[in-house]
Amino acid sequence: MRRMPTVNLKDAKASFSSMVDLAIKGQFITITRHGKAVATLVPLEAAELARKAMERKRPSLSDYLRSFPGAALARDATPSREVDL
């Protein structure tokens, strides 16, 4: 697996056009500020896939469990046990 290039923010601003060219070719470029990774420049296709995945509505756990056939969920009416702290 190829390591993704890392560029500090100052150099990223100075060479943005060449970094966009790398992204067009499929490279992911990590941008750092004060030595800490803060952003990644990615190809448009990867960004679109990530955006679609984040927008996808996922059911809650309770909705998922209710979708099982015959899964009538009834609340247990018995009181909870006492816990000494």
Image (cartoon, rainbow, N blue to C red):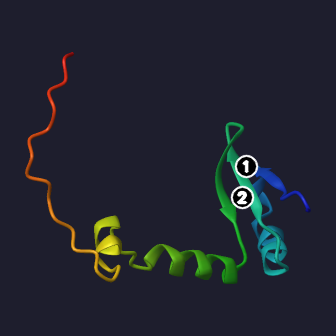
Q: Is residue 4 above or below residue 73?
A: above
On screen, residue 76 versus residue 59, left or right, reads left
Three-letter amino acid code of the residue under disc 1: Lys
Side of 5 where 37 appears, left or right:
left
Work out whether 65 lies above or below 67: above
In this view, the residue farthest toward the right is: 2
Name the residue carrying label 2: 13
Labels in figure, total: 2
Q: Is residue 28 above or below residue 57?
A: above
Q: Which quadrant holds the N terminus?
A: bottom right
Q: Is residue 9 visible?
A: no
Q: Amino acid at mark 2?
A: Lys
Q: Are marks 2 and 1 in contact (CB under 8 Å)?
A: yes
Q: Position of residue 20 (x, y in %)?
A: 77, 73
Please name whichever residue, 85 or 79, is drawn nearer the observer in this view of the structure: 79
Residue 32 seen in the figure: yes
Q: Position of residue 70 (x, y in %)?
A: 28, 80
> Which residue is labeled 1 in the image?
10
How many neighbours does mark 1 have within 10 angstroms: few (below 14), some (14-19), or many (20 or more)?
few
Q: Quadrant of residue 66?
A: bottom left
Residue in front for this viewpoint, 11 or 65: 65
